[in-house]
């Protein structure tokens, strides 16, 4: 499973990228707002930093506006995946961009039917939102599983990009189901390394080494 980092924090992206944990980056207007910087400037800096796809989201809600904004974002780098909402206008824009050979990330997916439409429109990535479904007492992983089944049934090339990930458990669950990509905040990716038994075992090793006066250098 590929790891995308869901942030516009350049320092956080750099840290994880240096560790080999970054296959791409996803951004959205809310994340750009937190950075306090110009959207085009931030996305260009991210593209210069990482090798994989970088999702830049349009803010227009109409087809013509999405096309204009998507083309502007695509000028930044060939790494750009134009992020459009899962609406009729968004799907129409997805079809246009995909026919032009541009990568497209269709976001705000909450049903298998929506994911099927996105695949038919040629989406590179479909972003089902796990956490927001969980917030409604629905199991977001059920949606990932349904989409995986449908895409495998018909051989769609669209990659399932599990989004709105809130925990390390979300990451492992998405991997077990077969999501192609998971995008998560830096803190969640780091949390995947944590385990109480690792901490306990390390503490014991350190104490034993100290008691035995073990020194390597």
Image: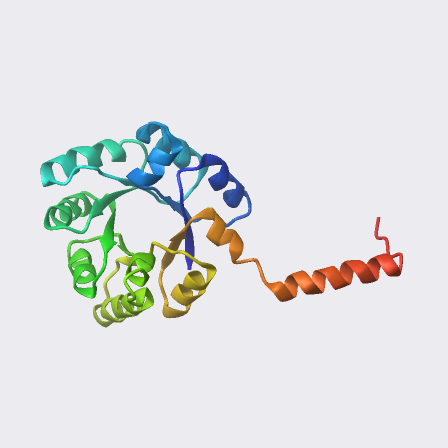
Q: Residue furthest right?
A: 213
Q: Is residue 103 left or right of residue 7?
A: left
Compare residues 203 and 127 and report the one nearer the observer.
203
Q: Is residue 201 left or right of residue 210?
A: left
Is 137 situated above or below 7? below
> What residue do we see at 18% from left, 62% from top?
116
Image location of residue 22, percent across then percent down: 46, 48
Image location of residue 153, percent across then percent down: 23, 72
Q: Quadrant of residue 154?
A: bottom left
Is 91 situated above or below 38? below
> What residue do we see at 41% from left, 51% from top?
184
Quadrant where the N terminus lies?
Answer: bottom left
Image location of residue 121, percent across then percent down: 15, 54
Tell how many labels.
0
Q: Is residue 127 left or right of residue 184?
A: left
Compare residues 162 and 74 and report the one nearer the observer.
162
Image location of residue 120, percent across then percent down: 15, 58
Q: Is residue 6 left or right of residue 190?
A: left
> What residue do we see at 44% from left, 37% from top?
9
């Amino acid at each position: 499973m590929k790891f995308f980092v869901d942030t516009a924090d350049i320092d956080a992206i750099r840290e994880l990228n240096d560790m080999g944990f970054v296959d791409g980056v996803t951004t959205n207007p809310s994340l750009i707002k937190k950075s306090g910087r110009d959207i085009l400037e931030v996305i260009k800096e991210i593209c210069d930093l990482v090798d994989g796809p970088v999702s830049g989201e349009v803010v227009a809600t109409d087809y013509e506006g999405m096309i204009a904004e998507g083309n502007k974002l695509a000028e930044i780098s060939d790494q750009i995946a134009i992020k459009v909402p899962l609406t009729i206008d968004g799907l129409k824009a997805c079809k246009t961009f995909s026919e032009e050979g541009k990568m497209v990330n269709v976001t705000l997916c909450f049903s298998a039917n929506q994911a099927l439409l996105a695949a038919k429109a040629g989406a590179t990535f479909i972003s089902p939102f796990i956490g927001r479904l969980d917030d409604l007492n629905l199991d977001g992983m059920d949606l990932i599983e349904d989409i995986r089944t449908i895409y495998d049934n018909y051989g769609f090339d669209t990659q399932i990009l599990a989004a709105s990930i809130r925990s390390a458990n979300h990451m492992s669950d998405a991997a077990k189901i077969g999501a192609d990509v998971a995008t998560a905040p830096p803190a969640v990716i780091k949390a995947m390394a944590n385990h109480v038994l690792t901490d306990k075992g390390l503490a014991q090793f350190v104490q034993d080494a100290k008691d035995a006066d073990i020194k390597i250098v």
